[in-house]
Amino acid sequence: MHFLSPILESYITNSSEDEPELLQELTRETHLKVIQPRMITGHFQGRVLSMLSKIINPKYILEIGTYTGYSALCLAEGLQKEGELHTIEVNEELHQMQRKYFDKSGFGFQVKQHVGDALEIVPSLNQTFDLVFIDAQKVNYDAYFEAVIQKTNPGSVILSDNVLWSGKVVEPIQKSDKATAALLEYNQKLKNDPRVESVLLPIRDGLTLSRVL
């Protein structure tokens, strides 16, 4: 996941906006209580998500893959005052931790939690989303994209996380490695899909920005 030297990563982080104290607290609790804490978005990428959201100033945000809520809190920083963020997580055991930090953030009333399969939940949502963040099961990225693009307008932005997959996308693929194979197909799809224009950024584990045409 780390492609730059630790010294450069530290310099980049220290030269960017400080991590809010609440997100520092969430990071500590995630590392103490939750399996695979490396999945948390983290300081630098979190500030990138916050900045993108503030630039877009969305009324409605959709997130697929809440985990402990770090990325949702970052994205919520750019919401319009009357806006909503809908976030979907398959693991119901994380619901309480997410809600605790959503409410402590001041965005709690704007964050709508959904528990279950995103491919079933997304079609049931009535909103049209200005900003979408996909960060869930990699083998389903194509299906997630097809589901969410139906809920966007021209000019909406779809963010896809982990698209470099710790560099595995440029290494020989093991036959059993379905996630890497799926991401390779997905990355090529986004490049060629006439419905969007995309750019892949080497931020953390790879973040693709796709603008709906």
Image: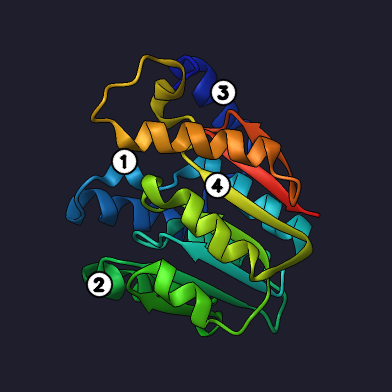
Compare marks 2 and 4 and give the one earlier in the sequence: 2
Quadrant position of the N terminus in the picture: top left
Q: Earlier in the sequence, mark 3 or mark 4?
A: 3
Which circle's residue, 1 or 2, is located before the other in the chain? 1
Residue 185, image x, y percentages: 50, 35
Residue 100 falls left or right of residue 14? left
Residue corresponding to mark 1: 38
The amino acid type of the residue labelled 3 equals Tyr
Q: In terms of sequence position, does the residue under pointer 3 or pointer 2 come before the other?
A: 3
- Is the residue marked by circle 2 packed among few (<14), some (14-19), or many (20+) residues within 10 Å? few
Q: Which residue is mark 3?
A: 11
Q: Residue at x 64, y 71 (%)?
A: 151
Q: Position of residue 13 (x, y in %)?
A: 55, 32
Circle nearer the viewer, 2 or 4: 4
Q: Which residue is mark 2?
A: 92
Pick whichever, 194 or 76, lies toward us: 194
Residue sitting at 35 percent across and 51 percent down?
27
Nearer to me, 140 or 69 = 140
Q: Secondary structure at mark 4?
A: strand
Which numbered disc flags the more N-terminal residue, 4 or 1?
Answer: 1
- Separation of residues labelled 1 and 2 (CA atoms): 19 Å
125 and 94: which is toward the camera: 125
From the viewer's perspective, is 140 left or right of 28?
right
Mark 4 vs mark 1: in front:
4
Task: Give the amino acid type for the residue marked by disc 1 in the picture.
Answer: Arg
Q: Secondary structure at mark 1?
A: helix
